[in-house]
Amino acid sequence: MGLGFLSPLFLLGALTVAIPVVLHLFRRRNDPVVPFSAMRFLRQVPIEQARRRRLQDLLLLALRVAALLLLAIGFARPYLQSPMSASQAGVTVVAVDVSASMGDAIRFARATTLATQAIDKAPAGDQVAVVQFASRADVLVEPGPDRNAARAAIARLQPSFGPTRYHAAIARGLDVVGARTGRLVLVTDLQSSGWTSADAVGVPARVSIEVADVGPLPPNVGIAALDRVPQGVRVGLSSTGASRAVDVELSLDGRSAGRQRVTLPADGTGDVLFAGLTATAGVVRAQLGTPDGIPADDQRWLVLDSRPGVRAAIIASPGAGLDDAVYVRRALEAAEGSAAWRVEVRPADRVQDGANLSGVAVAVLVGTAGLDRRGAEALGRFVEQGGGLLVAVGPGVNVELLAAGLGSAFPRLRVGPPAETPYSLVPTDGRHPIFRLFDPDAGAFDQARFSRIATIATTAPSNVIARFDNGAPALVDQAMGKGRLGVFASDLSNRWNDLVLQPAFVPWVVETASWLAANHAAPTGVVAGDGVTAQAQRPGVIDWRPTAAAGAPATRLAVNVAAQESDPRRVSAAAFVAQVTRDAEDRAGAPAAARRQEAEQGWWRYGLALMLIGLVVESAIGRRG
């Protein structure tokens, strides 16, 4: 047993006890003796005993010192360190993969068997917990001694339609283990697409990682794509295993629109064209005639309805400054045809109030000449009310004006000098919607060179989703009221960088604008179980409404299984464990244990209660004196 403090720096507050001590010492004085002869004319009064007075002063001093000490100790959050808490019973967490690739009955039955065996093999003193995971991880059974409850939860598991995300399973497993020792057993098919470059998570040495392999994906034919083309509708197929012939059925709004047979090569792909299907509205469903391999990819959906155009405003400096909007405008107009985005270029001096941005889903600011304080405040209100704003910090942008107009939520910006060596851009969150399209191609931005950048110091909760190779934030995304604000630390006009000349520029601008306009714009596609909306848990068609306008007409969206769930590539169990990053310092363990012990004991409450009692007593004694 030992005494610990959750916030030991508050103990420095104990130095304030010097204040009452110093005041007490200065208060002591020796009154001079004044001769006075006519004592018989004075009324007799009780003479205060000096010793009694000194005792009272010392008691008041002790109470004041104790109050300050208790206050400092209370803020330091004391707790008794128990050696038993660090060596409590370990935790065995069994995380079962329920992603779409686990959908065949034979392998899923094997998964439940392996999960049950992992429960049975847990050390006798261990608590057990059960987690299911796909794109996210959910705790089904919290750590506890009841192994029957864990087995029952495993028996109730069913495969879902979501994509595999190992990062979610490991991070959730570590949350369950907390500061204790533990085992994390992942029951999975070891599909390699479940790992990405952005999935690093530090695992302390006190937590062991084990893998229970359910085996490779079975031979499978899946529908990987369903597109509208000028000749009709194209169905893209992928096949693993031997060459085979499959039937593909197509329906429009529930009515048969054709059936074709195609022979696919071994481990190959093929297309089926349903010519003549030129409908401009309705729901198309493609389905394999005979279910095969992984059931989740045997069908795919396509909504033919025309998508409502999304209004985007590019705000640029008037005159020659309007040229700064050219690249962004062309990028947005190139997205799925000009009907997908309705793009307007507006001089900054015409943005004066909210009416100028009425109906706009996203604004891209590339110049501020002519923009006054009232216009900057209008931009702030636009975002607060649900709009999206992307600020590209280039030579034509006045960052001080934006900070004054958008308020404290706007990050502090400072434009740096020209770089001696150009910087490059590195996405830091490959799963963010802005960079999800580039996730398989981590080097999509490698060729872009930045000769000048701005430093970004955020003042509100934000997400740095891209950095320069010197570590400085390059793209920051944060919520602001009902809308979203994005800040890019360079320009979009080929002055400070050549990003606009790279192949990744057009899709990046489109994805960034789509993310910022998400409150108004319908997503281009929805992956089942990927968290875009709570409705999209299984393949099919959903009615979607923008969150910023609950009364707006619904847009029908197709929900499909992630194509990578049909990817048969795997990693070995040894390679899987080797890919897990180890946290040698175990930065989370000890603080978590300390927080748990302190929360359980709550000694600070008693300390503050004693302080209040002492102050009441001090006040009563002081009045009597």
Image (cartoon, rainbow, N blue to C red):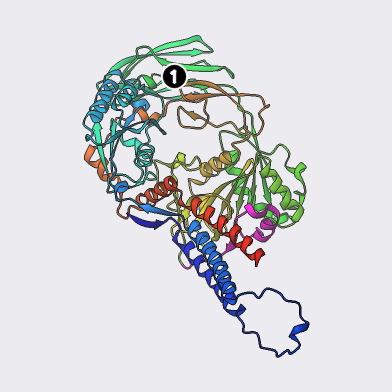
> Does 96 appear above or below 280?
below
Which residues, given as a range, are shown in magenta? 393-420
Residue 417 in the magenta stretch? The answer is: yes
> Does 177 appear above or below 80?
above
For residue 42, what is the image quadrant? bottom right
Q: Nearer the viewer, residue 586 or 148?
A: 148
Q: Which of 110 and 611 is in front in this view?
A: 611
Q: Residue placed farthest to the top in the image?
A: 255
Is 39 placed left or right of 397 in the picture?
Answer: right
Q: Is mark 1 on a helix, strand or loop?
A: strand
The crowd level at tag 1 (other Cα within 10 Å; few <14, some 14-19, many 20+) is: some
Residue 181's x, y, as percent?
Answer: 28, 44
Q: Residue placed farthest to the front in the image?
A: 40
Residue 38 in the magenta stretch? The answer is: no
Q: Which of 118 and 293 is in front in this view?
A: 118
Is 11 placed left or right of 353 in the picture?
Answer: left
> Does 480 appear above or below 467?
above
> Does 158 appear above or below 386?
above
Image point (46%, 39%), residue name: 437
For residue 166, what is the image quadrant? top left
Image point (46%, 10%), residue name: 258
Which amino acid type is marked by label 1?
A: Leu
Image point (44%, 17%), residue name: 286
Is 520 placed left or right of 430 in the picture?
Answer: right
Is residue 157 shown to the viewer in this render?
yes
Residue 613's x, y, as percent?
Answer: 56, 55
Residue 17's x, y, as percent?
Answer: 53, 69
Is 145 placed left or right of 544 in the picture?
Answer: left
